[in-house]
Amino acid sequence: MKFPVTRTQLAAAGSKFVFARPCKRCKAELEFHRTPTGALAPLQVVVMDGGAWMLDSHFKTCPFRDEFKKDAVPAKQKDLFE
């Protein structure tokens, strides 16, 4: 799926809203959607030109995104992923 997308487009593609909470590192408000493959996708609202908004992958904008790679999680942050 090409991002950014609307909630309607996500649902049509088979994704389902699971929960919302802030990013544990940068505190951005996120929505988590379960993709058809079973992955949990962190998405955030992005305001487009003209004031319309869509959802985009938080991995594009989070300044701490490298810390969330499974092979790069320091032991002191393991509790963030359990």
Image (cartoon, grey):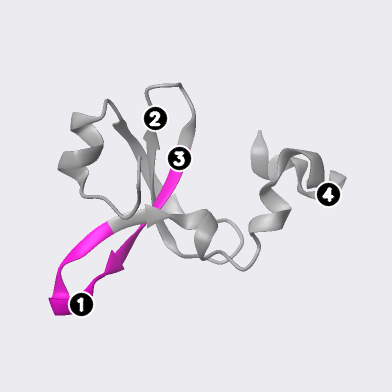
**Looking at the rendered structure, which numbered label has been put on residue 49?**
1
Q: Describe the element under mark 3 as helix, strand or loop.
A: strand
The alpha-carbon separation of the residues under discs 2 and 3 comes to: 6 Å
The alpha-carbon separation of the residues under discs 4 and 2 comes to: 27 Å
The amino acid marked with disc number 2 is Arg
Camera-side mark, 1 or 2: 1
Q: Which residue is mark 3?
A: 41
- The residue that appears at 44% across and 21% down in the rendered structure is 37
- Do the residues under discs 2 and 3 have CB atoms within 8 angstroms? yes
Q: Describe the element under mark 4 as helix, strand or loop.
A: helix
**Looking at the rendered structure, which numbered label has been put on residue 34?**
2
Q: Nearer the viewer, residue 62 or 49?
A: 49
Magenta segment boundaries in residue numbering: 41-54
Q: Earlier in the sequence, mark 4 or mark 2?
A: 2
Q: Describe the element under mark 1 as helix, strand or loop.
A: helix
- Do the residues under discs 1 and 4 have CB atoms within 8 angstroms? no
- Do the residues under discs 3 and 4 have CB atoms within 8 angstroms? no
- Do the residues under discs 1 and 2 have CB atoms within 8 angstroms? no
Q: Position of residue 77 (x, y in %)?
A: 76, 48
The alpha-carbon separation of the residues under discs 1 and 2 comes to: 27 Å
Give the answer, above or below, for where 21 lies relative to 32: below
